[in-house]
Image (tube, rainbow, N blue to C red):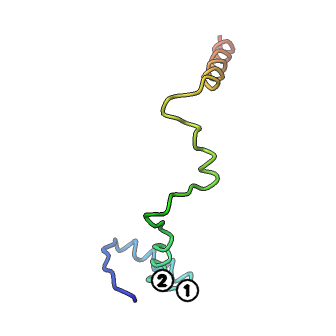
Amino acid sequence: MQSQLIVDLDDALIKKAENWAQMRQISLSEAIALLLQQLPSSDQPLTLSPWTQSLVGLFNSEGETSQESQLQQQYIDYLEEKYR
């Protein structure tokens, strides 16, 4: 079953979407349906891309680990010595 949906959008955005759909030889309705199909369902857990997963843990709210802190301090000491 199909239903109609009324959406208020900026004219420039509509034109951009129409051009995009026309280049792919699909209707604007099909283009919007494809976009909406990509939305995760509310019961589906969010999955991160491998690249994003590799970033998880690089920054934490508690600050740096002691090893990171030591490396940073060593680098600061090196720069201070270099530019004296």
Query: Of residues 11 and 63, which is closer to you in this image?
Result: 63
- Residue at 60%, 44% in the rendered image: 55
What SS does tag 2 mark? helix
Circle 1 packing at 10 Å, graded few (<14), some (14-19), many (20+), is: few
Q: Which mark is residue 77?
A: none
Task: Give the quadrant of residue 25.
Answer: bottom right
The answer to whether 17 appears left or right of 67 in the picture is: left
- Please, is residue 2 above or below residue 14 in the view? below
Are discs 1 and 2 less than 8 Å apart at CB? no
Between disc 1 and disc 2, the foreground one is: 2
Comparing 43 with 3, the one in front is 43
Circle 1: residue type: Gln
Q: Secondary structure at mark 1?
A: loop
Q: Residue 60: give x, y in percent of width and height.
A: 52, 35
Q: For the point 30% across and 79% down, which residue is it? A: 6
Q: Position of residue 9 (x, y in %)?
A: 33, 72
Q: Which residue is mark 1?
A: 25
What separation in Å lies between label 1 and label 2 (alpha carbons)? 10 Å
Q: Quadrant of residue 68?
A: top right
- Amino acid type for the residue under numbered disc 2: Glu
Write the residue at 58% across / 43% down. 56
Q: What residue do we see at 33% from left, 81% from top?
A: 5
Question: Which mark is drawn over residue 30?
Answer: 2
Quadrant (top left, top right, bottom left, bottom right) of the C terminus: top right
Q: Is residue 35 above or below residue 22?
A: above
| Image-based side of 75 in relation to 40, left or right | right
* Residue extending farthest front: 43
Give residue 41's position: percent from left, percent from top.
46, 67
Count the marks.
Answer: 2
